[in-house]
Image (tube, grey):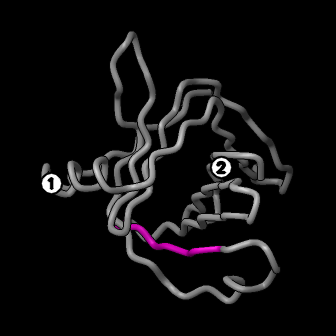
Amino acid sequence: MKLDSDVSRIGNLNYLLAITFGRNRETNVAQVLSSGPSGEEAETEFPGDFIVTISRRAVIVTICVMGRRAPIICKRWKRVRSEDENSMPGLRITAYRDEDGNGWKHLRDDCGGEGLTRYRKDGSDALNFRLGCL
């Protein structure tokens, strides 16, 4: 199984602004949680040198391939209201929706841990990045 690329053109200026002013976090593994047609769930881990950039208007995920950074996710997104934003003390949840309609949740705790999860709009899988001690 391979980690699929999901890159869209967000414009050179938006890309530069996101990389420069966004929050850049490094992680060594991406997890894909998928469910099959009969309801069984599978978790697949993809090791790699990932950098996740979270900005107000875009999310960018790059991986190091032969010494160069190649984008695997590059999406515009907008913040949306979520019912679980203030559901747990010590945990801040920010919800986003990208240009394809996929849902994103950015989790931050008081200890400095972070996580970013993408939920496909059809419910087929979830892509998770642990960006700290969450």
Magenta residues?
93-99
Occupied quadrant, residue 62:
top left
Q: Residue furthest front?
A: 111
For label 2, the SS is: strand
x then y, percent, for residue 57: 33, 67
Q: Amino acid at mark 1?
A: Gly
Dot 2 corresponds to which residue?
128
Q: Amino acid at mark 2?
A: Asn
In the figure, is residue 36 to the left or right of 4? right
Q: Nearer the viewer, residue 41 or 92?
A: 92
Dot 1 corresponds to which residue?
11
In the figure, is residue 32 to the left or right of 63? right
Q: Nearer the viewer, residue 37 or 24?
A: 24
x then y, percent, for residue 65: 41, 17
64 relative to 114, above or below: above
4 relative to 67, above or below: below
In the figure, is residue 91 to the left or right of 73? right
